[in-house]
Image (cartoon, grey):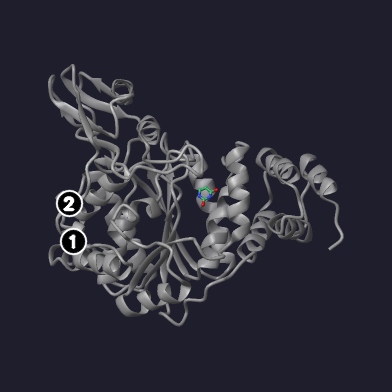
Amino acid sequence: MNMNMVEIIDKKRMGKELTNDEILYFVENYTAGEIPDYQAAALLMAICINGMTEEEIFSLTMAMAGSGEKLDLRDIADNVVDKHSTGGVGDKVTLIISPILASLGVPIAKMSGRGLGITGGTVDKLQAIPAYRTDISVEEFKKNVKEIGISLISQTMDLAPADKKIYALRDSIAAVQSIPLIASSIMSKKIAGGSNCLVMDVTYGSGAFMKNKFQAKRLADTMKKIWRGENRKITCVISKMEQPLGYSVGNTLEVIEAVQALHGQMAEDLQEVVLTMCVQMLKLAGRTQTENELKNQIWGAIHSGRAFEKFAELARRQGADASYLYDLNKFEKAPMIVPLISEKNGYVQELNAEKVGKISIDLGAGRKKKEDEIDRRVGIILCKKIGDKVEEGETLGFIHANSSDKIEEHIEELKLAYKIVANPVQKESVVDEIL
Ligand code: URA
């Protein structure tokens, strides 16, 4: 294609609609290294500012999905169900629902990402299980799904390489917050991943990319149009991410919480998201029972120990030392564990997810730059959540740190994340809508 990148940028700068060929030209040539970062950055920023039409978003998604290998999982089952969250703090839902569903006979073939900004990533959590390999081959991935019904890996294969490159650039030029760019980024990876059913957890609030429900619904709507355009089945769960999900934030701490959840002990908000996502995934997989019957099946998988055993089987299959999952005390602890003590009586009105996410990054649980090493031991345990009653002298939470250097600062920041008021606070449900 003989096109001029300056003209493409200029067209988008003027708010005009790009053609499919122009978008394909940009994606193919940027991925191949023929278009410099500064021109790609200019176009992405123009998209951020001026938006895209539905046709443009579809073209961008398909161009990115087609930039590498595309998996076909139809030989595994008629319905292979994937799930994805648009991001959150303390979100360990994949670790919990994947083995539950696999133990109920729904094949789970899932590729996950690393943490992005303050939002944690499933790959970093899986790697907190000693020796767990997220980088197995496509063949091994498919073999595991066929033989044990589950595989959870990272996006190491050549899937949607254009997204990898474009995402890294967006991250460095403040061009992440854009519905067309987020929708096409997520959907290109999911289309290349090969599942025909998808349940999206579209989060909004202080700990999410979308800051309000209106934006979350627009993002959900955009993703649904793309996925349905491909003749695949999708459900979007709109959920709040005002406070971290569950009681822990940080990789090892979240694996421990996930194992406890698989034994039936779950924080209320985590349980609500787990049950909702599982029910929606079972429905897309073709289960026709009522929601109550499906919930009974989910609790059956948990209480019988089958869901936990499936998680341990997955860990063993992917090279991990599963003994850690049977004896959670074996996980290495952070050297400094410091409590935050409440200075007043009252009720928790706010527990700001963004602030907690920032502390966890600063502790080393996530990356500030993409090449940073993370410390899997560190993080935050939250003992009190929104609506809980608190007494003076009670512990609100713990900071798990690898040194004493900034511990006082982190405790102070955690204190600021909590707002405690005198009057009782109503606990609200996390799941807002199912679309
Ligand atoms: N997750 C993605 O994969 N891409 C985005 O752009 C945002 C969140």
Compared with residue 144, is residue 250 higher up or lower down, i.e. above or below?
above
In this orientation, which residue lies closer to the viewer: 349 or 409?
409
Disc 1 designates what residue?
A: 323
On the picture, is 17 further left or further right than 94?
right
Return the x and y of residue 152 as percentages of the image width and height.
Answer: 37, 64
Compared with residue 345, is residue 238 higher up or lower down, i.e. above or below?
below
Compared with residue 259, is residue 387 higher up or lower down, i.e. above or below?
above
Return the x and y of residue 357 as percentages of the image width and height.
Answer: 38, 35
Quarter of the picture holding the C terminus:
bottom left
Please identify the residue farthest to the bottom as the structure is shown.
75
Q: Where residue 330 is drawn, which disc sits there? A: 2
Q: Residue at x 20, y 18 (%)?
A: 422
Q: Amino acid at mark 2?
A: Lys
How many tags in the picture? 2
Q: Classify mark 1: residues with Cα within 10 Å, few (<14), some (14-19) or many (20+).
A: some
- Whichever of labels 1 and 2 marks the residue nearer the N terminus, that label is 1
Quarter of the picture holding the N terminus:
bottom right
Element type at marker 2?
helix
Return the x and y of residue 165 as percentages of the image width and height.
Answer: 62, 52
Quarter assignment of residue 11: top right
Q: Where residue 405 is drawn, which disc sits there? A: none
On the picture, is 48 further left or further right than 313?
right
